[in-house]
Image: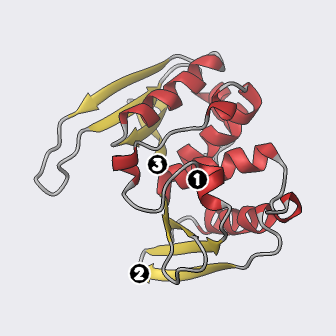
Amino acid sequence: MKNKILNPDKCLQAYIIGIALGDGNLSNPSGRGVRLRISCDTKYPKLIQKIKNSLRLLLPNNSVSVYKKKVSCVDISCYSNYWPLLLGWKLLGSKYRQSVNVPDWIKKSKKYSVYCLRGLIETDGSIYLDRGYKMVMFVSIISDLAQSFADMASNLGFIPRVYSLNPKTKFNSKRLYHVRISKNVDNFLKLVKPEKA
């Protein structure tokens, strides 16, 4: 594989990894190329365009498509055999079974952590008001991924709180891990700059 096909910008790579860890999945439907598919709610048109543009920047020689999945959801997809190597996932099995996580090269860098956190918040995160106070919440069924989010936020000087909740229904049978940032939220958002802010 020639490196010129994949944009060497590590900040861009860290952002896409965060997006993929949140709402992405890998498949190989044709047997010829690996497909990264990222699901996004249609109420975030700017985020859809941002993800599409970021994938085009990362893989300038590859096409990026947007498919309407349901009335309120689209899939943004891009084929590349780089995906398993970049993401560190296998094609077979769910992200939960593989216990996918943030690569060490991102966790060891404050700069790259900011970009990865941005992607994670834009997909599996939320920004909301609780009794008039702004909060950031990241939710995952993968405990190691939730802990990595907390560790990256801690390394940036913030104080996240990690807790878990038992499933409420048989449909959602997996334990949910929540990471909440409730102090210095404005500073956190100024640093990370997620599209949802």
Q: Which residue is mark 1?
A: 19
Q: Residues within 10 Å of mark 1 (few under 14, many from 20)?
A: many
Q: Position of residue 82 (x, y in %)?
A: 68, 61
**In-image side of 35 versus 108 (left or right):** left
What's the mark number on residue 71?
2
Q: Residue at x 71, y 65 (%)?
A: 55
Q: Position of residue 57 (x, y in %)?
A: 81, 63
Q: Position of residue 160 (x, y in %)?
A: 48, 21
Q: Secondary structure at mark 2?
A: loop
**Vertical placement of 134 versus 57: above or below?**
above
Residues under labels 3 and 2: Cα distance? 20 Å
Q: Which residue is mark 3?
A: 124
**Quarter of the picture holding the C terminus:** top right
The image quadrant that residue 161 belongs to is: top left
Amino acid marked by disc 2: Val
Q: Earlier in the sequence, mark 3 or mark 2?
A: 2
Could you say which is closer to the camera, residue 164 or residue 191? 164
Q: Position of residue 110 (x, y in %)?
A: 72, 26
**Quarter of the picture holding the N terminus:** bottom right
Task: Please name which of the two marks, 3 or 1, marks the residue nearer to the observer.
Answer: 1
Could you say which is closer to the camera, residue 107 or residue 39? 107
Q: Residue at x 69, y 34 (%)?
A: 114
Picture mark count: 3
**Observer able to see residue 190:** no
Q: Earlier in the sequence, mark 2 or mark 1?
A: 1
Q: Residues within 10 Å of mark 3 (few under 14, many from 20)?
A: some
